[in-house]
Image (cartoon, rainbow, N blue to C red):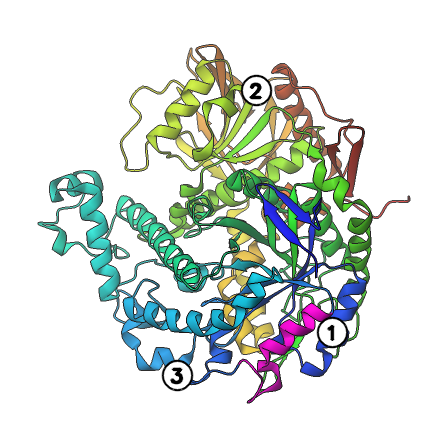
Amino acid sequence: MKKIKIEGSKVFINNEENILYGGEFQYFRIPRIYWDNSLKLLKEACCNFISFYIPWIWHEYEENIFDFQGKTYPERDLISFIELCKKNGFNIIVRPGPYIYAEYQGFGIPEWLRQKHPEILIKYENGKISHEISLNHPIYLEYVKKWYENLFRILKPYFDENLIFACQIDNETGLPQFGYVPYMSDFNEDTILKYRLYCQNRFTTIENFNSILKTNYKDFEEIEPPRKYKSNKYHFRLYGEFIEDYIIQYLQTLKSMIISFGINTFFYLNDPYLCQWPHHSTKKSKIATIGYDTYPKFSFSDSILDLPFSLSYAPELFSSINNNSITIGAEIGCGWFDPHIEVHEESTLQLALVSLARNTKLLAYYILHDGLEHYNQEWVFKAPINLFGKTTPRYDVIKSIGIFLKNYGNKISESEQAYSPIIIGVYIPHARDIIRPNVNYLSVLDEMNNALIHFNGASSLIGMLVESGYNPRVYDLELLDNEILRKTKVLFLFSTGHIDKSSYLKILRFVYEGGTLITIGNPIYEDDIGDKIEKDYLYPAIPEENNIIHFGAIKILSKVSLDIINYQIRRTKISHKHSLNTLDMMQPFSESIKYIGKDGDWADTFLGNKIWLSKFASFWKPNSKIIPLIKYNEKIVSYYTRYGYGKSIFIGSLLGLFYDSSTFYTKEKKKKESLTSFFSYLLKENGIKQLYKPQNDIEIIIRNTKKEKIIFCINRGKKKKN
């Protein structure tokens, strides 16, 4: 056991700045006979901590009947497992839920609780009852408090001696409750009351509410959550924001409960790196440090990575969100549970090394050991240690990285990453656009474009920029202040067409004072509540009639439809039924990811070169205020305009979308170079120098110490000699 201390953005292990390296060991799924030997194997791999869920459903198997000592099942002996970790020299992170997800029975919540109190469950607008819980329901919270009280009574001595040095609150909160729901509203009576109070506190009068939301309620007692086909997008946006804040209230309640039991430790949360609704990770970071979850491979294809440059995007975004705290790779995918998907060892290697090179100070693999459910169903993740306690080829990967960190972890942790004066701005509320009041063919195309703008645009751009010799920062736009912007020469913004007034004024000032704004996707035409931007200094062009062309949309939809049929056949052969919850939820995203960026067409740039457009192109009428940069069939797709002392550049296409998809590995060199040369020109025109000489398919990350440079070279392409 080591002395671990987390101070601000630094980790100290035995008073030396270093990196925490380990991962998830699910004792409740691993036969007890393998515990000790498997922990020894992980010690040999230079892991210095172990994390694990503590499933409520497993330990309080009947109401008020707890087993933490293995009286009913050997794998319920939590106390002996903790002592075994201590004996083997591991410090511990606990993840006590109440929701653990984990493709586990009840997502960790006891079934007896759901059966006894169906009034705590989420209710859909058609009256059907969900299996998941309205999180702030007072009856549910009473039972959570009892669970915590019994659990933390046992854990407190281990917190006090620093054996347990961190505690995760809940898990991916919002995903189990809303990740499966095409329409987001919860009509549970308690949630409706809380929503009405939220609206009344925010808008004060019903007249104000109706004016802003474009509704016609008579009083607040009439207000209900938005209904599909009936409510407008502004009501959906407001309700989306309510659910985000509802989750924050829940997490704060859980944290306060744990502290009330005398627990003084480092708390953290975790979210999928995409920040899809309702995961507003910046809001959650006000409760505790928020870690990112990222998995390298989940689609039925032979590529090394499904989303190659999300590996770089995730730690950069979460570094900026946490600001004065450490960057946590809360779940660094170490395999996958769909038996038909092959996750290469190189996938694990690249994911881990990129995470470490990009500021991650706590790296937790998910998972380290395959398991067996108590009803004898295998749960195979293709982990470093298999079901029978034997090492797999992935073990050699995590061991090699562990040895690397043992030798260089201190030096890496004390170094600072080198950045270009470039920021990629991410506007998290755009994620609410994906939930729509109605769906038809055109809205599906629109929704697909908005999803790609928000979820894949920024990560694709990182790929293009690092292959051009630049290394951008990634920031939540709402966190950007004028001091940061004054040090920035170019700000990229991916836009679905709306933004809050405060953020709009911020970027307006940035341009006026001499910065260059590059907006990709849609021009900003309204704020979040629908008020139009009257005089548009940044986007003065008017759209053409028949404003947009979609590249390969019908082909993509037909391919995805066929893939979903194939998946339905494959899923009949998956025996671990709880895994199907997640796999079903990920359709059709996990299949469509193979095709994004595959289709496109050539366009002409103002430099006289060709450039490859991806997914769609929008067209804009010429006028005296704009200078065209890209044209497609003589129609303007991209332009720039001056405002104050700076420039606003608009690009009506998702350039380089294939950089963050498996298409990256097969795209022709000519198409990649058309993009890198275009962006390199724009950046050089703004006085930004390359950090290094670009190399094809090599991601270069430079970290500076006081005396030397540490250079990571990540091979993003085919196998190379030396």
C-alpha separation, residue under disc 2 versus residue under disc 1 = 50 Å
User: Of residues 438 and 109, which is closer to you in this image?
Assistant: 109
Give the position of the C terminus as an image quadrant. Answer: top right
Query: What stretch of residues is rendered in magenta?
Result: 68-87
Where is the N terminus found, in terms of image quarters? bottom right
The image quarter in which residue 529 lies = top left
Q: Is disc 3 in contact with disc 2, using a CB cutoff of under 8 Å?
A: no
Q: CA distance from mark 1 to mark 3?
A: 34 Å
Across and down, in percent, residue 427 comes to 45, 38
Q: CA distance from mark 3 to mark 2?
A: 60 Å
Q: Residue 105, how many percent across, how many down?
A: 50, 77
Q: Residue furthest right?
A: 722
Q: In the image, 451: left or right of 248?
A: right
Compare marks 3 and 2 and give the one earlier in the sequence.
Answer: 3
Asked whether the viewer can see residue 236, the reply is yes
Q: Which residue type does callout 3 highlight?
A: Glu
Q: Please say whether residue 77 is one of the residues in the magenta stretch.
A: yes
Q: Earlier in the sequence, mark 1 or mark 3?
A: 3
Residue tagged 1 = 386
Residue annotated with mark 3: 63
The secondary structure type at the circle numbered 1 is loop
| Residue at 57% across, 74% down | 571
Which residue has dot 2 on it? 489
Which SS class for mark 3? loop
Front residue of 214 and 667:
214
Q: Secondary structure at mark 2?
A: loop
Q: Left or right: 693 with respect to 247?
A: right
Q: Is residue 573 visible?
A: no
